[in-house]
Amino acid sequence: MDEYQKLRRFLNEFPIGFPESPSGVEIEILKQLFTREEAHLVTFLSPIPQEAKQIAKKHGLNAEELEEKLEAMSKKGLIFRTRRGGKTYYNAVPFMIGLYEYSVKKMDKHLAELYKKYYDEVFLEELGASNVPGFKVLPVNEAIEPNMTLFPYHKLEESIKNARKISLTECICRKEARLTGKGCNYPLETCLSFGVAAEYYIENGIGREITAEEALKIIEEADKAGLVHAGANSKHLSNICNCCPCCCASMKGITQYGQDKHKFLNALFESVIDPDKCIGCGSCVERCPVKAIELIESAHVDREKCLGCGLCYSSCPEEAITLVLREDREEPFNRMIELGTAIIRGKKGKKGKN
């Protein structure tokens, strides 16, 4: 079998896979990203970080030569690399979150068009196939009811302040949209990574290092612009995307394709409007990115649509809106591996019903 076909099958084994499309555009994407040798080598890795010498031993390769090649591939954003305790570990990554995001600095119009075609043909369906949301929505603290008892992972600002390392880069979704002539005017440099992910971005030149204060300023500006703050649906903070309703791979599944929010986003909070304070000005209706609020004398929230993003809060002149934790909320997964397992089970369960 051709190396690119083998790689496609390999990537399709991840929780969010890399399914075959009618046009075969996914193979063209792989050819843009990988040389034939790189495509071959990736399939020797696993999602679990390993040293080059472990991988080499398993596949009968020269350890020094392999490490040199893996290091070069990691610098190109084709695999992930972690350094700790004086040792370097490598692991394979999925298309999303992974290859797609890591290509932000090398994406041109041609690659952007390939990504868009793949999304339209099969990847939107793949993103929502499990009905397990891959992202959680985190509002700014000011929007939350002050007397609410919160866990640390509910607190966006506190999580950012406690981060060991932070990187900033462009939003891959908005950059793709601009290159394909479908862009918006929302801010572009808004994608935050933390910890080992930030180290990877910084060392590879994919993102630049910033302070916690700078990251909080990015969040503040993104909130004013009307962007939704979303991170991986686990308790550990690894990334924050500031998502627009028009370009974001998850958000546009809701806003443009009419799919249920739960396929993509875990809403931990919900907006509550005090009818005695509401003057019916409609500011929150215009501000809501998913049209979850309607005006019937006073504003009313459709909690089935509400993301709990808090954007309506900042638009209300009467301070009639607060956010509360949903009583029926699904808490984020403890670890990413648990999220991945749930996505796989969700996809298998869906197939069983067909």
Image (spheres, helix red, strand yellow):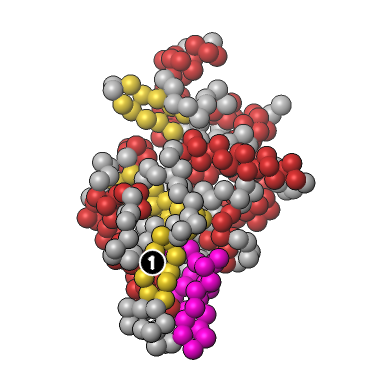
Q: Is residue 93 above or below residue 158?
A: above
Q: Residue at x 77, y 46 (%)?
A: 354
Q: Position of residue 50 (x, y in %)?
A: 44, 22
Q: Is residue 313 above or below residue 120?
A: below
**Pointer 1: what residue?**
323
Inspect this view and state whether residue 134 appears. Answer: yes
* The one of 318 and 65 positioned closer to us in this rendering: 318
The crowd level at tag 1 (other Cα within 10 Å; few <14, some 14-19, many 20+) is many
* Residue 240 among magenta residues: no
Q: Is residue 326 above or below residue 273?
A: above
Classify residue 187 by image quadrant: bottom left
Can you name the residue that lies furthest to the right here? 354
Inspect this view and state whether residue 226 appears. Answer: no
Q: Residue at x 53, y 38 (%)?
A: 340
Mark 1: secondary structure: strand
Q: Position of residue 246 (x, y in %)?
A: 52, 66
* Residue 305 among magenta residues: yes
Q: Amino acid at mark 1?
A: Leu
| Quarter of the N terminus within the rendering | top right
Q: Residue at x 50, y 37 (%)?
A: 338
Q: Residue at x 68, y 39 (%)?
A: 348
Q: Is residue 225 left or right of residue 46?
A: left
Magenta residues (range): 285-308
Q: Position of residue 254 (x, y in %)?
A: 58, 63
* The one of 321 and 12 positioned closer to us in this rendering: 321
Classify residue 144 by image quadrant: bottom left
Q: Position of residue 33 (x, y in %)?
A: 54, 39
